[in-house]
Structures are given as structure tokens and as C-alpha cells.
Amino acid sequence: MLIIVSSLLFGHFLFWFLPGLFGTWNAKSVDQLYVLRYEYFPSRIPYDSTVIVVNETDSTIQALTASYLTRRHYGQVVRNLGDLGVAVQIYDYIFSAPQDSAEDAFFMACNWHAGNAYFGMGFALKDEPPKQRPPKPAAIWKYLSHTKWHVQVEGDVSTMYVAANPNITFPELASSARGLGSLALPFDQDGVYRRAPLLLRYEDGFYPSFAFIAICDYLQVPPEHILVRPGKSITLKDAHRPGVPPHDVVIPVDERCNIIVNFVGPWSRITNYDFALIYRASDDRDNMEYSMKPEFEGKLVVVADASTGATDIHPVPTDNYYPLSGLHANVLNTILTENFLRELLPWEMIIVEILLLGFVALFALKLSSRGLWVGALLLLIGYLLLVATAFLFGNLIFNIVRPVIITLVAVFGVLVYRFINEEREKEATQRSFEAYLPPSVVKRQLAHPESIFEVQKKELTIMFTDIKSFTTYSSIMSPDQIQNFLAEYFDAMVQIVFKYEGTVDKYIGDGLMVFFGAPEPQADHAVRCVKAAIEMQKKCRELKEKWVREGLFPLKIRVGINTGEVVVGNMGTRKKLAYTVLGSDVNLANRLESNAPVEGIMISRRTYDLVKDEIPTLSHEPVLVKGLDTPIEVYTVPVDETTL
């Protein structure tokens, strides 16, 4: 649970601490959905042919045989578009100062004639209102104060952009037009234009954007019928589009009242006309009336400069070089078609991320590490398919990068946790194994531990040893002497057992129980066991001589060996397991040790059958052991210099 919560917090921390990196990465990922939609699902992006663009291009200057366009050119286009019956014409220009008085007068007369032309105005977008006004002519402040909008508001407008430092079309020309709209557009941290503010705060009112003032005019929605809810929506009440019943148009917006522009595709997707075509339309009145007017009547026309060297060409999600007049056209199209995009709210995304982490937690509980990776990969593929489907068919924008990072961090955290735990368990297992397995066997078994933890029934050879009269001698020894004595003795015995790759089962007081043939299979387990017993007896005789010289008691041991079918594996409780053997043949080995001659080795008939061809043995009279009613056949193994 700690890993899951930490990964969620870590993902959010990255986006908070490095928004320029991870926020941009996410925005670029979403941009690919626009491209995917246009290439493979173009029918999912309706383009309303009511919206068209008239461009001033390089060919315009050539066609008009002019070095540049004058106010007379723009005035004639305004008049001609008005005569063609367009519904609204908006000019992506700011005519900030008067020029030639005759041309300005002609331009204004054309505006009055058309009655539907809007021009641009520029603002600096701020978070707080300026402390004082910049020096501007009084006529500009008077115009702005007279034309600002008063709309209905629900909620906190302090998060909206503030319109500062205005640069407007000069008041005389502006007064002849239908109105002015803000051309201010914010770009994201990567320089890409994805959103457009529909309203800006200005003093105690608001100023509409270039496209928003035009669409409200077209839909016959006055400012007092607009409801603004920052962070939620802007509602155009009783919108009247020609041929469509009146209804409310609800536009989702963020806290700054930005609309997410639902781009229809690259620049070529929007219907374009050349400025010169419109300018010259009045040269042939019949063609204008009977051919062009049916094509232009009722249209929303954006007029802009798209010539070489134009400064309003920037990247958008669908195109790296896109005239921003096209962005205004896309805003118009988005509102007109009511095909709005909406980003999931922060709390909605957190729910999605928690669900993803829930699957990761489930996988972690049920699957192996490899299965966890595969499950996480399939989970992320499923999430990306969900994201694409939601965008294509639900107009919903999910955060793509953050959930992926959170999921991968969670999976990585689980794997690291497992690795650390497995290493600890492996280390603990290794320490445990090293107490009863030779180092070479430990390494092999840790690489393939299945046989260690598998309980099975198989034939093994079991050995018991015991020190003669140790209880009697230990009664006169100090605890430290007993400890040192047994440590030296067991160390010598275990080294011999490990030499023959036997397994130390347990220490029983001064006795030792070992077995051969598990965990690793040994075809010659009986031979190994008997050879180890012979070497152990020889070593004990060396220790006896040493200890006698030191004034200690003479070391003598008995060894009993039996071969038979036993149960071998990890036995015990969940908290304490021991790798051991169980069965009647284990008990028989113990009984043989009790009956073995001092400093001798007694083996059973089954062991004898397995070693007789390699190791000398001696017959021994049958012995009656505890638990059996009849004597059993046994043999002894001589221990001398020639043995082995």
C-alpha cells in the first residue's frame, strides 16, 4: 500500500515541480490524438462550411498590382463581403492609427454600408489589474469604457485573464465597425497554441475575444444573455442559429475561461479564398450577384494576412506552421458545431489513477514478477486505448503521461521491494542452508531452489553418530570446555560430511544426524555416506590422541548407517521450517548407531548391498533393535589405514 500511495504522490510531484517538462510531454502526447483523428477518423471532426477564411497572400499583391494594400483595398473588401450577404466578417488586423484621410473616410463608409465588420484589438494578458492606466488618448479609454460587456457571473472571476495595456483600432474607425474583439491568445510552455480565452476581465466588465464577439452576434446572443462560470462553462442562452430551434449553447472552459480549440485538421481543411478575388468581385456585378453570392451568403468570414513574412503563423496541435486566423476560424467552428473538448477534472483524473494503481496492486498480489510486467504492459495498452477512444468518440481529454509514470513507478517499486525481500530471504536461506549443506551444493540449490522446498519420498542413506560416555565426562567439565569441545568436534565432522556433499540434518546433543542423496540426487549416496563415516572415525582417532595429550577425555564415537525410502523436505510450521527426513528407516539408522561397536561403523543390509563392491565390510551377527520383533541382518565396516 505504501508503494502504491508513494507512486501516486510521486507522479503528482513531478508535474508540480517540473511542469515545463512533464506538462509539455503530456500536451505533445495529446497532440498526437488530433493527428490520429484527422488521418484515420476524419468523420469525427465536423467542419461547418459556414466558416470560411479570406487570406491576403503573396499572390494577392501580384494580382492587385500593388506594392502593399491600402485602407481603400480593405474598405472595398468589407463592402463587397457585405454585398455578398455574409453574416459576419471579422478582420484579424489592428488599424491602430489614421492614415490617409480620404482612404480612411472611404474605409469607414464601407463599414457603415456593410454593418457587420469586426476588427481586432490587442491586450496584454495579466493575472492582476494594473495599478494605473498607461498613457493613451482619452478617446481610447472612452471607447473601451463604452463598449465593454456586462455578463452574468457565477463563481470567482479572479482566475480569469485581465486585459491590460490596450492597443485598439483607432476609435473613429472602430465606431464605424460592428465592434472590436481581442486578438490576445496565450500559448503553452512549448510555444504551441491549443486554447483561446473567450472573455477577458476589463475594469468592472469584460471584453470578448475576436471569435467570441462574432459568434455571439451570429447566434443573436447579447452580453446580458451570457452566463459565465469560470472553471466550468460559458452558456449562451437562447442561441438563435438560422434554421435551428433556439437553445442554450454550453461551452466548457477552464478557470481562465479558455476554450480548448477542437482543430479540424491542418490548414488545408478550412475553406480558403484569396483576398484579391473578393476585392475584384464588384468588377462583375452579375457574377457577384448570381455566382458568388449564393456561395458566400450567410457565411462567417475571417479575413487575415497569410503572406510570406506574416508574424501570426505559429504551431498548433495539427500543424507546425499555422496562421492564427485559422485558430479563430477553429474557435468559430468548435462553437458552431458544439463539438467541444473537455479535459477531465483533477479529481476525475485522480480516480482514474487510483483505479490503475488498484490493478497494479491486484497484479502484485496474484502474479510473479514477470507476470506483473506483462500485466502492467497490458494495463497501459488498455489505458492508452481508453484515452484514444474517449478522445475520438467522447471528446474527453485524459492526462496521458502522468498515469503512465505513476503506473510504471508503482510496478518498479513493487519489483524493487520484491527484489530486496527475495535477496533477504535468499541470504537467510543461504545462511540456513550453509549450516547443513556444503557450499557447492548451496550455490546450486539457490540457483534452482525447487527441490529444497519440494516434499518428496525417495531412497536416501542416513547416518547417526554419538560420542561414547560424553554425558559422564561432561559432568566434570565447565560450560566453556563443553562448548569448545563440541565446536571443534562438530566442525571436523561437518567438514567431512560436506566433503562428500552430505546434508547435516540436526545436532542432537553430542550426536549428529546426516543424510545423503538429497536435496541433490546422488546415485552413489550410500557409498558417499560410508566413506564419510570411515573418514570421520579416522579424524576422531586423531582428535582422541590430541585431547589425551591435553588431559581431556579420549574421544570415541559410534556410527550407524541405514539406506531406505524416507520422506524428505521442509517440515514444520510457517514460522519455523527445517529441511529433514522422516520415516522408519531413519529410526533404524538411529538404532544401528546404538548397537554399533565403539569406534566402529554398523550398516544395514540395504546399505551393504549398495557399497559391497567398493568398500570392504565384515559380517556381524544379527541384532535385535527396538521396535522390531526379529533380529535384522547387519554388517560392520573396518576402519584402518587401508580403508579408502
Image (cartoon, helix red, strand yellow):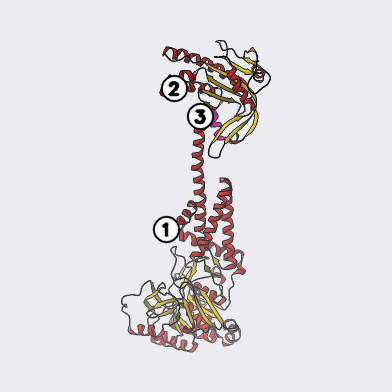
Q: Amino acid at mark 2?
A: Ile
Q: Which residues are magenta?
A: 433-447
Disc 1: which residue: 18
Circles 1 and 2: CB atoms closer than 8 Å:
no
Residue nearest the viewer, comparing 108 with 574: 574
Residue 140 picture location, percent across and down: 36, 83
Residue 641 picture location, percent across and down: 55, 10
Gap between marks 1 and 2, in whole Å? Answer: 67 Å
What is the chief secondary structure element of the magenta stretch?
A: helix
Q: Residue 482, labelled with which disc?
A: 2
Q: Quadrant of residue 484?
A: top left
Q: Amino acid at mark 3?
A: Ala
Q: Earlier in the sequence, mark 2 or mark 3?
A: 3
Q: Amino acid at mark 1?
A: Leu
Q: Quadrant of the C terminus?
A: top right
Disc 3: which residue: 435
User: Helix or strand or loop: what does disc 1 sit on?
Assistant: loop
Residue 79 picture location, percent across and down: 50, 86
User: Mark 1 or 3, which is nearer the eye?
Assistant: 3
Residue under the image location 57 percent in, 36 percent down: 572
| Up-down relation of residue 487 to residue 117 (above or below) | above
| Up-down relation of residue 203 to residue 429 (above or below) | below
Query: For the view shown, which residue lies furthest in the right direction?
Result: 630
Gap between marks 1 and 3, in whole Å? Answer: 53 Å
